[in-house]
């Protein structure tokens, strides 16, 4: 791949996204999928002449957590830096756009991208001015005044409802000051919004950035051609939010580890008492069907063999560890027990590709974080042994960061919903809209 060398060089500055295993260690499938990396152009496929002097609109995902105006986790901003630095090095002038939070009725100070522009300035080592808006004459004037290598950030795109509606008139105004478009926001690639899909109708070329390309390389590559044996770790509270992923992964994986609150819907499906644990009664039959499908296909589904239970959903609740089939009335399961973690270590020890999406318990409470951190430790160990480990967004990423093991995984995804949809085999509109090679 033409861009591979460039990608490896520029990812060096984004430590949370460095590979602990060979960067392109995912074996490709013989039947390319609609989102496969090789089918879409990236910035690395463009010549210097196609970038020098161009006004580039780049969609990044700087939707970072804030405590007031203080960024508490700048992972997504750091992840956007390599592509921006590459564009700057080629003499393009760059305008970064993104959303932040969920503003309801126009501009709100708490959703301003000002903290993000300030942090990006620090990371780039150069000023990143924040535009007062994302469309309009003032924005157009700022873009026009940019010199080669300059970077600005447009204000929150979701200050306009037309952004999520992908309204054609808004899209045209949004795209007007620019020559080309780069999408480097995997976290919103599953949305057909103005800043992810709409602008591709007005700006050409429209290509992927290095982060988006890397996400597809790992996630799409793992699902469609990951080296066997392959395992998936699916956690979280609800079967309803993960059922499509579970069904798809039963087809792809040799082993599936189920954790988190959804465990108890599966245990109830097996006829067991689960006390006051979270159960989705409407999905008990669905859980039965998943278990039956896996058995018929000769796939292994691992449920906990022991469970940390509590007498209340509270960080200071009374706790005990019981067998999976001995949860008493009035108690709820909130984490895996130590025997389960040992079982998971054995099951994953021979796997060559592992995808994790969702925690094993209520890891926000110290009393119930051992199951999640335990499996993170296991993944870090097998990565050292050559396995490809992919952390599929959301709470899984937070758990890796909190445990200090994020940089020991092969790939940390920046997209929660996008990761899920890609794992389900869905087309991502923000990817499908990009130029083909």
Image (cartoon, grey):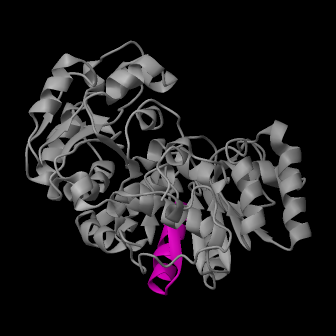
Please name the residue shown 51% across and 48% down the image. 431
Where is residue 207 drawn, in percent x and y?
Answer: 40, 51
Where is residue 373 drawn, in percent x and y?
Answer: 48, 64
Q: Residue 323's image quarter?
A: bottom right
Q: Residue 145's image quarter?
A: top left
In the rendered image, the vertical position of residue 115 relative to residue 42, given as above or below: above
Front in this rendered view, residue 68 or 427: 427
Q: Is residue 333 visible?
A: no
Please name the residue shown 67% across and 42% down the image. 241
Q: Is residue 31 visible?
A: yes
Report the predominant secondary structure element of the magenta stretch. helix
Residue 386 belongs to magenta span:
yes
Where is residue 275 drawn, in percent x and y?
Answer: 77, 45
* Quadrant holding the N terminus: bottom left
Segment colored magenta: 370-391
User: Is residue 308 shown left or right of residue 13?
Assistant: right
User: Is residue 329 shown left or right of residue 63?
Assistant: right
Front in this rendered view, residue 213 or 330: 213
In the rendered image, the vertical position of residue 74 relative to residue 167, given as above or below: below
User: Is residue 59 shown left or right of residue 56?
Assistant: right
Residue 244 belongs to magenta span:
no
Farthest top residue?
105
User: Is residue 155 shown left or right of residue 205?
Assistant: left
Please name the residue shown 39% across and 68% down the image. 405
Where is residue 284 drawn, in percent x and y?
Answer: 85, 45
In the rendered image, the vertical position of residue 56 relative to residue 14, given as above or below: above
Please name the residue shown 38% across and 47% down the image. 205
Front in this rendered view, residue 406 or 225: 225
């Amino acid at each position: 791949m033409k861009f591979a060398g460039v990608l490896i060089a520029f990812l060096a500055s984004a430590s949370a996204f460095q590979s602990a295993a060979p960067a392109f260690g995912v074996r490709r499938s013989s039947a390319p999928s609609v989102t496969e990396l090789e089918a879409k152009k990236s910035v690395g496929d463009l010549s210097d002449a196609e970038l020098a002097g161009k006004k580039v609109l780049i969609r990044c995902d700087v939707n970072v957590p804030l405590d007031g105006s203080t960024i508490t986790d700048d992972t997504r901003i750091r992840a956007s830096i390599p592509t921006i630095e590459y564009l700057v090095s080629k003499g393009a002038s760059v305008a970064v756009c993104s959303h932040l939070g969920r503003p309801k009725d126009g501009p709100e100070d708490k959703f301003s991208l000002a903290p993000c522009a300030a942090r990006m300035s620090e990371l780039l080592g150069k000023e990143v001015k924040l535009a007062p808006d994302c469309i309009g004459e003032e924005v157009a004037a700022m873009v026009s005044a940019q010199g080669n290598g300059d970077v600005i950030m447009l204000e929150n795109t979701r200050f306009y409802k037309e952004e999520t509606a992908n309204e054609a008139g808004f899209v045209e105004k949004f795209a007007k000051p620019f020559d080309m478009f780069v999408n480097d926001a995997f976290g919103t690639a599953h949305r057909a919004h103005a800043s992810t899909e709409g602008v591709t109708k007005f700006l050409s070329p429209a290509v992927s950035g290095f982060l988006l390309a890397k996400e597809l390389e790992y996630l799409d590559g793992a699902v469609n051609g990951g080296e066997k044996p392959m395992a998936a770790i699916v956690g979280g509270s609800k079967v309803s939010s993960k059922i499509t992923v579970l069904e798809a992964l039963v087809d792809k994986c040799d082993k599936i580890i189920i954790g988190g609150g959804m465990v108890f819907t599966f245990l109830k499906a097996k006829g067991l008492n689960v006390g006051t644990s979270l159960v989705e009664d409407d999905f008990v039959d669905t859980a039965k069907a998943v278990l039956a499908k896996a058995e018929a296909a000769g796939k292994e589904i691992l449920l906990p063999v022991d469970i940390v239970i509590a007498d209340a959903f509270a960080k200071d609740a009374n706790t005990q560890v019981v067998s999976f089939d001995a949860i008493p009335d009035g108690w709820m399961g909130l984490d895996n027990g130590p025997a389960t973690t040992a079982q998971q270590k054995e099951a994953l020890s021979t796997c060559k590709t592992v995808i994790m999406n969702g925690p094993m318990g209520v890891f926000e409470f110290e009393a119930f974080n051992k199951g999640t951190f335990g499996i993170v430790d296991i993944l870090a160990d097998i990565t050292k042994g050559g396995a490809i480990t992919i952390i599929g967004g959301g709470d899984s990423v937070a758990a890796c960061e909190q445990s200090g093991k994020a940089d020991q995984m092969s790939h940390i995804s920046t997209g929660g919903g996008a990761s899920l949809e890609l794992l389900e085999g869905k087309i991502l509109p923000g990817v499908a809209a990009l130029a083909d090679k």
